[in-house]
Image (tube, grey):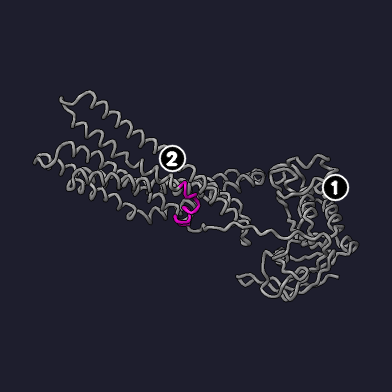
């Protein structure tokens, strides 16, 4: 993510207003230096009227400059808001449309709330501070040169010394920031594990070892954070020392000019006061560049996204698609073979059960059918259409995730469905009898914590029915349920008016025969019918 890309996010009028405010604010040092140095021109011959006019003009000039400073901050806050929204929307869009997205939600959340906050403070905000500092330095430098070219030139040349700092510390600062980001991510993961596994820790009296293990990660993370900050302090110290030399040495030269009657004291006072607004802003600009370097590791993986969602055509309620798997083979990049030349026609309304040992590839087969993975060879089609372009498949996982919102939202996912349709599918899965008729606007906690495992499964099934999905895939959907609930869920799914494909370890042979479920077993890449 480059500066050019970031600035494109801002409205042109906002950029103009920010630049105008920064230009006026950049006269801060010049106005103050002029006000103080010109006082030496007043003497016993000056009148009270002259003094009042001078004070009025000085107040007016300072008021204009400081008002511009306030406006600059307000405009900058608006720009940072726009850039934050754009950055996070880009990230959310890229994750929602990335088929390779993994389930490491903690890492993604950490990026939004930690890494992106670092981008805001150490990049977005500093873009404007850097430009403002450079403008202030340039305006003050011009003023200094107009007062006296030789002395002013000395001040300006020496004021360039602080700019050397980014060259000296750039790589060290970037490396330290990347190490801290990595350690911070690992510590976040460790803390998450600690709290999620608290019951196991207490059961096995592992509080001491788990505490020490987590504390070690904490120490590592804080140590790397300290090292990053210490390197920034070292860079700042070098910048300050170079800045000190940059105005003391030319000031001494200015004294020789005064002694030799080549320049007046008022000019040296003006140059001295204004030179601080050359050296100071350039020192700040150097420091800002150092801080901006700390975000390079995060920004390099962020890219501009064209946010455009393709709305898939709604499923025709009368459609009865056939699923056809033709000569499909699949192997992972590491060479592990999952499926060998598998072909199968699945008529609409059929019920299939795929079994096999752990790691044999059952879940991979479901991902192929849904289009999350592409076959190494062969093809999978639904009604003559590639599965990746289909909108007719629902995927029900072992532990369905429910959003911390109303049951209505969990069913509709924000899309428009009538209460009648929502209640109808909830009635089909038996949830109205258990949760009551006013359940649509009820909240059941983060992840559906206030619902049982069987109820969460049925909410997921109800959602599939509401969206009129023609093919339902179930991945170990009953493995965490007791026998009674497992039987209830299976009775429900086998009676659904759609195609059902389930992978499972545990099943009842008599039940699947009774309901006409076709049973296949996956073993070493070969799919075999179980009679």
Q: Could you classify mark 2 by the number of other residues whose Cα lies within 10 Å: few (under 14), some (14-19), or many (20 or more)?
A: some
Residue displayed at 26% across by 37% down: 33
Magenta-colored stretch includes residue 337: no
Q: Residue beneath label 2, please?
A: 73
Q: Which numbered dot is residue 491?
A: none
Quadrant assignment, res 370: bottom right
SS at badge 2: helix
Task: Estimate how packed mark 1 is, as few (under 14), some (14 to 19) or many (20 or more) residues with alpha carbons within 10 Å.
Answer: some
Q: Nearer the viewer, residue 305 or 264?
A: 264
- Report x, y in % for residue 212: 54, 45
Q: Nearer the viewer, residue 23 or 131?
A: 23
Q: Find residue 251 and report its horizontal and vertical position in percent.
A: 18, 42
Q: Quadrant of the C terminus?
A: bottom right
Lower sequence index among marks 1 and 2: 2
Segment tinted magenta in the rendering: 1-14
Residue at left offset 85%, top offset 59%: 497
Residue 213 visible? The answer is no
Q: Is residue 386 left or right of residue 246?
A: right
Q: Residue at x 54, y 46 (%)?
A: 113
- Of the numbered discs in the image, which one, if any, rests on residue 427? 1
From the viewer's side, name the closer residue of 514 and 62.
62
Q: Residue furthest top?
A: 48
In this view, 483 is above or below 510? above
Question: Does residue 3 belong to the magenta stretch?
Answer: yes
Q: Is residue 399 visible?
A: yes
């Amino acid at each position: 993510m480059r500066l050019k890309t970031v600035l494109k996010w801002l409205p042109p009028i906002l950029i103009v207003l920010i630049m105008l405010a920064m230009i006026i604010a950049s006269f801060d040092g010049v106005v103050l230096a002029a006000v103080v140095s010109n006082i030496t021109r007043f003497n016993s011959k000056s009148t009270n009227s002259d003094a009042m006019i001078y004070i009025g003009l000085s107040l007016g000039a300072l008021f204009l400059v400081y008002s511009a400073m306030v406006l600059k901050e307000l405009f900058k806050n608006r720009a940072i808001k726009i850039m934050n929204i754009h950055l996070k929307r880009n990230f959310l869009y890229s994750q929602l449309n990335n088929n390779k997205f993994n389930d490491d939600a903690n890492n993604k959340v950490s990026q939004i709330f930690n890494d992106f906050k670092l981008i805001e403070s150490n990049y977005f905000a500093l873009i404007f501070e850097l430009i403002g500092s450079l403008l202030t330095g340039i305006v003050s430098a011009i003023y200094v040169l107009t007062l006296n070219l030789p002395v002013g030139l000395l001040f300006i040349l020496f004021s360039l010394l602080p700019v050397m700092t980014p060259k000296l510390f750039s790589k060290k600062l970037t490396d330290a920031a990347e190490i801290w980001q990595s350690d911070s991510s690992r510590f976040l993961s460790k803390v998450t594990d600690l709290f999620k596994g608290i019951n196991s820790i207490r059961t096995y009296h592992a509080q001491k070892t788990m505490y020490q293990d987590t504390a070690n990660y904490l120490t590592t993370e804080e140590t790397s954070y300290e090292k990053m900050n210490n390197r920034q302090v070292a860079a700042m110290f070098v910048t300050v020392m170079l800045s000190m030399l940059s105005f003391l040495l030319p000031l001494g030269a200015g004294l020789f000019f005064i002694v030799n009657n080549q320049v007046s004291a008022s000019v040296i006072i003006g140059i001295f006061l204004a030179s601080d607004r050359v050296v100071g802003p350039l020192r700040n600009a150097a420091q800002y560049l150092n801080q901006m370097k700390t975000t390079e590791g995060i920004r390099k993986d962020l890219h501009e996204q064209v946010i455009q969602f393709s709305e898939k055509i709604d499923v025709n309620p009368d459609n009865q698609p056939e699923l056809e798997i033709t000569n499909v083979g699949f192997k992972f990049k590491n060479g592990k073979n999952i499926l060998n030349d598998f072909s199968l026609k699945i008529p609409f309304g059929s019920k299939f059960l795929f079994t096999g040992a752990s790691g044999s590839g059952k879940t991979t087969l479901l991902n192929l059918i849904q289009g999350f993975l592409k076959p190494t060879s062969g093809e999978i089609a639904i009604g003559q259409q590639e599965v990746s372009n289909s909108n007719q498949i629902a995927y029900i996982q072992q532990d369905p995730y429910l959003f911390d919102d109303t049951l209505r939202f969990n069913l509709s996912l924000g899309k428009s469905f009538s209460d009648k349709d929502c209640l109808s599918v909830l009635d089909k899965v038996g949830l109205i009898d258990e949760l009551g008729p006013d359940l649509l606007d009820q909240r059941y906690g983060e992840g559906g914590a206030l619902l049982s495992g069987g109820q969460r499964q049925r909410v997921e099934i109800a959602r599939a029915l509401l969206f009129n999905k023609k093919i339902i895939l179930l991945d170990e959907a009953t493995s965490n349920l007791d026998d009674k609930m497992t039987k209830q869920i299976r009775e429900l799914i086998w009676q659904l008016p759609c195609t059902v494909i389930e992978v499972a370890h545990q099943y009842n042979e008599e039940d699947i025969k009774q309901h006409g479920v076709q049973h296949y077993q996956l073993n070493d890449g070969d799919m075999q019918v179980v009679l």
